[in-house]
Image: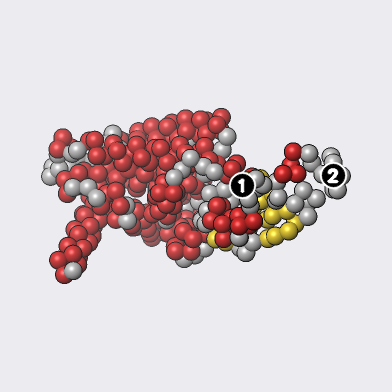
Amino acid sequence: MDAVNTIHGPEQQDKLIVDLTFIAIYQPVDSRQRKIFYHVRSPTNYAFKIQITYDFHHRIVHASNCYQGSIHDITILRESGLLEYAQEDLPTLNILQADISTLTSDQWTLLSNLVHSYDERKVISVCQRLVQEDEYLHSMKPANETLVKQFFTLLYETTELCLSSNGDLRSLSFNDRSVLLRTGADSITCYGGIFSMYQFQLRTCQSFLHSLRRIYGEHSLMLTLNSIKFIDPDIVLNKMALLLLFSSKTTCIFSSTISLDHADVSVILKIQNRYAEIAWKYLLYKYDEYQAVQKFMKLIQCLIAVIQTMSQVQSVESHVNDIETIVEHTQLKLILDDIEQFNETVGD
């Protein structure tokens, strides 16, 4: 290693070295704050950012203010004022190039919106109580039925919020929206439930598993547990997987009022392709190419496993009724929002 006072040959033409780092923070409670502090590389997915500038004598010459994690690196560099001192014949060595992703600004915004559209935190407290009771009773008694019902109620509410906040769903025609609502409600509910079981340790909660067995049957439970094996620990990737499944026509519960044949498949596939592209670019940004390929392959396996689970639970009448209720609630909300937007447009 060179001494601190060593002058590097080819680097003499560069003024400064600029790099950014992040300081991980806990997930903010407020949803608006979560969007502001979101940082994909933070272990908690939320962080502050700070820019450090030093010379080739390894002396720190500038430290920026702290920025929210969602602020782009180049924005921090520009606001630091350092670029004003860079001349064409003395280019600044920009280590930020290693942090440039292939995601466009619009794709980053869409990724952030999609990730925050599904808020799994709604079920945290009830999951914790289910696990605590299971441990206290040593899995000797059935799960508290009130807690089980509360889990599914919150799961359905989370699904409704995710659907109603999806801009792509809102932009569709009434018929296409109706079709995608049914596939989406089923997909998000099933994947979201499986993801919650993985994330909040319900997969080992025997009393809760007993309740699932009673409601959905042994085969459905086995398929659910098999799906959990393919869940990736990356939260962002799971939410993108959930939305990839949402934008698919592969499986759909039966409806006597909506015909799948009348849906504009090209429009729905366009949405799915956009989500798939963002998911892949996210993987390339966060992981090396080998890891990205491995995770994408596992993602496909996970989606196939979840689709098998969805196919099985569609034979359960209570599940079909619950999905139809989600669809009706979401459809009504979207129609009311359309009417409100129309009235505002006419008023203007």
In the image, 333 versus 145, the foreground residue is 333
What's under tag 1, amino acid-wise?
Glu
Local SS, label 2? loop
Residue located 47% across and 30% down the image: 297
Residue farthest toward the left in the current orientation of the protein: 257
- Quarter holding residue 6: top right
Residue 295 place in picture, x, y as percent: 51, 34
- Quarter holding residue 259: top left
Instruction: Identify the disc placed on residue 260.
Output: none
Residue 245 place in picture, x, y as percent: 35, 40
- Relative to 20, say whether 316 is above or below: above
Residue located 46% across and 43% down the image: 103
Q: Residues within 10 Å of mark 2 (few under 14, many from 20)?
A: few
What's under tag 2, amino acid-wise?
Thr
In the image, 97 versus 330, the foreground residue is 97
Q: State the separation of the CA atoms marked 1 and 2.
A: 25 Å
- Is residue 245 visible in the rendered structure shown here? no
Local SS, label 1? loop
Residue located 63% across and 52% down the image: 86
In the image, 46 versus 93, the foreground residue is 93
Where is mark 2, residue-wise?
A: 6
Instruction: Identify the disc placed on residue 88.
Output: 1
Residue 25 place in picture, x, y as percent: 59, 59
Quarter that holds the C terminus: bottom left
Q: Are marks 1 and 2 in contact (CB under 8 Å)?
A: no
286 sits to left or right of 1: left
- Relative to 290, say whether 52 is above or below: below
Residue located 35% across and 33% down the image: 308
138 sits to left or right of 316: right
* Nearer to us: label 1 or label 2: 1
Quarter that holds the N terminus: top right
Q: Residues within 10 Å of mark 1 (few under 14, many from 20)?
A: few
